[in-house]
Image (tube, helix red, strand yellow):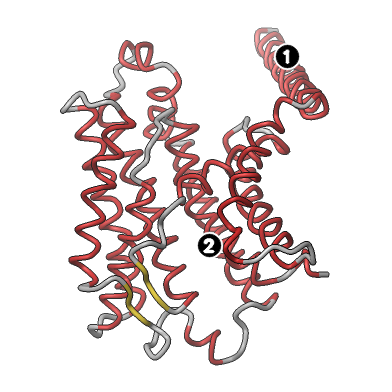
Amino acid sequence: MWFFQPAAFDIGLIYGLMALGVYMTFRILNFADLTVDGSFVTGAAIAASGILTGVPPLLATFFGFLTGCVAGVLTGLLNTKGKIDPLLAGILTQIALYSINLRIMGKANLALLRSDTLLSGMRDAGLLGTWGSVAVFGVLVAAVAAALVWFLGTNVGLGMQAAGNNPTMARAQGVHTNWMIILGLSLSNGLVAISGALMAQYQGFADISMGIGTIVIGLASVILGQAILGQKPVWRGILAALFGSVLYRAVLQAAMEAKIGLNPSDMKIISAVLVIAALLLPKLPFFQAMARARHEREIAKQVLDADIAAARNVTDVD
């Protein structure tokens, strides 16, 4: 069936790394970060330029991650130290990154099809765009998601969640909220940059305009996935962001391949419709009922856990 094209899942999983980055800022830090459109290209530009100059692909991709982290730090410093509004801080960094990315690349487009990349082996074996590559990307994304779940469960990760949920209370508990914001933005844009680096190697080129609309895709993935799967606890929110990314790409691919008169020039309007649908889904009675049911189950589980703990305490006293 055209709805289940493996290539759509490949791209959905690669963009899933970007969706995880957006999830960190949008849901964990409660920070509307627009740096994403720039840092996505930065990761692609660094990886592509490095590969073309002889840097090993894995190392070039890692450099892309580090540069994305630096972009996030810049946005964080503008916000926390410069007291600039989060939206404006992200826009300023994004604008600056456009020129920086052009400097890195030297021109608007870099071709990688004749260079060895992380994906050359799969490309040469004819695995790209098959269920084999879907499995490879699935394992990679699952490993990153598991690492993120672990990190957000550490003391630092819990401090980051507290900084995003209630900064005043977090500061009262000794959490340095400014540093949590900077760290969160750094890791977020690092993930976005890795997504950009992998996307450039997957499609065989890096382009200065490839990041346009990335933040929209990321937000749509997070909102769409969490409307269906929910966002609490953290592991479910992360899973929902990945699910939303794959679903978004699969629906987009299906719309393009369906015989309804659409062509590549309609990509933007299709994306806009999908984002509107993602925003409206949580307001539908069916999804609201699902959300209430999940909330009631979580409350019941918390009450049960409290009763079990109380019973154990009584037993220990006896």
SS of the residue under disc 1: helix
Q: In the visual, does 68 lie left or right of 127?
A: left
Crowd around label 2: few <14 · some 14–19 · many ≥20 (10 Å): many
Residue 147 spot, x, y in % from top left:
48, 50
Residue 297 spot, x, y in % from top left:
77, 23
Q: Which amino acid type is shown beneath numbered disc 1? A: Val
Q: In which quarter of the image is the N terminus?
A: bottom right
Q: In the visual, does 7 lie left or right of 79?
A: right
- Asked where in the image residue 177 lies, by quadrant, the reply is top left
Reading the chain from its start, which is encountered first: label 2 or label 1?
A: 2
SS of the residue under disc 2: helix
Q: In the visual, does 105 lie left or right of 200?
A: left
Indicate which disc residue 14 carries.
2
The one nearer the camera, 72 or 150, is 72
The one nearer the camera, 208 or 147, is 208
What distance separates the C-alpha of mark 2 from that of mark 1? Answer: 39 Å
Rendered position, 183 above or below 98:
above
Q: State the residue at coordinates (46%, 37%).
A: 152
Rendered position, 115 above or below 30:
below
- Asked where in the image residue 284 lies, by quadrant, the reply is top right
Rendered position, 33 above or below 127:
above
The one nearer the camera, 17 or 83, is 83
Indicate which disc residue 286 carries.
none
Residue pointed to by mark 1: 303
Q: Which amino acid type is shown beneath numbered disc 2? A: Ile
The one nearer the camera, 304 or 237, is 237
Residue 81 spot, x, y in % from top left:
16, 28
Q: Quadrant of the C terminus?
A: top right
Crowd around label 1: few <14 · some 14–19 · many ≥20 (10 Å): few
Contact check, label 2 and label 1, Cβ < 8 Å: no
Q: State the residue at coordinates (74%, 22%).
A: 301
Q: Which of marks 2 and 1 is in front?
A: 2
